[in-house]
Image (cartoon, rainbow, N blue to C red):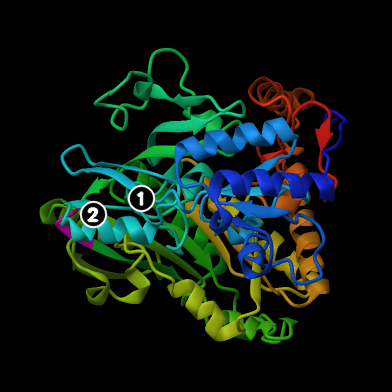
Amino acid sequence: MPMQAVPAVTPSPALIERAADRFTQLLGTDAVHREGRNLAEFRDPFEGPAATAHQPSFVIQPETVEQVQAAVQIAAELGVHLWTSSMGRNFGYGGSAPAVSGGIVLNLRRMNRILDIDAKQGFALIEPGVTFHRLYEELRAQDAPLMMSVPDLGWGSIIGNALEHGYGYNVHGDHASALCGLEAVLADGTLLRTGQGAISNSPVWSCHRRGFGPSLDELFKQSNFGVVTKAGLWLMPRPETIVTGTVRCEGDGDIVPMIDMLRRLMHEGVLQGVPMIVGTPADTESEEAGNGAFTMRNLRQVLRPGRWNARIGLYGPARMVEARRALLEEACATLPGAVLELRTYSGEAGPDEVEPRDLISAGIPNQVLLERLHGIFGPRIGHMDFSPVLPFTGEAALKAEALVRETLDRYGLVGPFGLLLTGRSMVSASMILFDTADAEQVETTRNAVREMYDRAAEWGCTGYRAHVSLVDHVAAKFDFNDHALGKIYARLKQAFDPAGILSPGNHGIWPAGQSSRDG
């Protein structure tokens, strides 16, 4: 069983007042938000107005590394805890909401400088407030011959997404792996640079992943051991040609040979990046299944055509892309009933030249998915994501989809079922949809996702990310050798941050003697 611990302490009102005064003296009144919309933005946007758990006390927004160091030192002096967010757009997992109510949100969106773009070496050096939209616009403004990877929504922080192990879809679609060299402020205010950055004025900090001795970069991803204030980001050369499109199959069992084919093509280097498969339920599903506006009928308007629809991409010099395309067409011809649909773009194509459905594959940040969801379900739509890591097999895909469909049907919920293909594994990308104004639906969704993690754990699988209310639940699934991994995390937390100043409970990591009360 996991180690038992006492709850983390919620600061008293008097201590919150004192802390707010100190942070205002440090940062100014415009960088400390205590009420109204400026504070509400940093709660879980999908919890609904009646939520009481995971509530921040106030928000601070430093602009410099020195201010972050000073803020951490003030927090340590006063004994309050900071909950770090970059832009705070991690909506399906709780946004900027802290694991323990009363946390002060340390939001880094004002640290939004692009410090360097090196077209020859193919990287950018950025701060955590730099969004996918912002970097894309700067690359275009400089006519830099580089292409970035983007997730489904481009409004978030690049560093924040990567630190959460987020995904895009082209060559550098594994965003955590695209980072190279971090700068982090530790809980005592120490400033650390990892890898080659530990050499003053290193010319290869953002070019070479490791330093001398253990590589520490991974310790600052999905953790609470420090506040990341800079990172190098690898970018791909702007390709001469982009070919993107879909492979579509109509039978339930077609997912097995489809995944066998896609896996082989990925291993051979024919397909690039992170293909995504969306499963659309057969027409025999009840069109009225769901609740209110959140019905299968409405969901079908968002989903792609075909029982199984795989989005794919090819990038590079035209001759190389043509060779990859020929191999792809040859492979698809052996898949009975498969329909291959492809579109070709210049690597220089901008947003006005690319079909909306292809913007992500073309590395162009957008809000198309959010706009479609709002258009169909209305502005009160929320989602909680169910994201287990699965074996890269069609059988695992069928098993996971059956779990999602059966559970959602039983709870009166709907949501798309998707799979991100990551080379040697798959990540389920299932958005469970609900009405944020309906407190019962919010709680029902949380219960459904919790149950699905329980059932997936019976297969030896669990999430790569989780909503802030479920992080302890998911962390407890890593139970080998009496939860040895979680105990190591706790020991590292004790070494880095024994007072639990930085994001206590993030990803289920607590200092000794602390745990969550919020649930």
Q: Nearer the viewer, residue 42 or 120?
A: 42
Q: From the viewer's perspective, is residue 509 above or below residue 42?
A: above
Give the x, y percent position of residue 512.
79, 26
Asked whether the viewer can see residue 328, the reply is: no
Q: Are marks 1 and 2 in contact (CB under 8 Å)?
A: yes
Prevalent SS, magenta region: loop
Which residue has dot 2 on it? 315
Tell me the quadrant of the picture where the N terminus can be found. top right
Report the side of 513 relative to 171 (left or right). right
Which residue has dot 1 on it? 273
Q: Secondary structure at mark 1?
A: loop
Say which residue appears at 43% left-offset and 50% top-offset: 158
User: Magenta includes 396?
Assistant: no
Dot 2 alpha-carbon crowd within 10 angstroms: few under 14, some 14 to 19, many 20 or more: many
Q: From the viewer's perspective, is residue 99 above or below residue 332?
A: above
User: Magenta includes 239?
Assistant: yes
Say which residue appears at 17% left-offset and 52% top-offset: 144
Give the x, y percent position of residue 105.
64, 50
Separation of disc 1 and disc 2 at Cα?
A: 9 Å
Dot 1 alpha-carbon crowd within 10 angstroms: few under 14, some 14 to 19, many 20 or more: many
Q: Nearer the viewer, residue 467 or 140?
A: 140
Q: Secondary structure at mark 2?
A: strand
Q: Which residues are magenta?
A: 238-242
Asked whether the viewer can see residue 193, the reply is: yes
Quarter where residue 340 is shown: bottom left
Give the x, y percent position of residue 146.
21, 51
Callout 2 amino acid: Tyr
Report the side of 422 relative to 92 (left or right). left
Give the x, y percent position of residue 347.
18, 60
Q: Return the residue found at the far front.
A: 25
Quarter where residue 124 is shown: top left
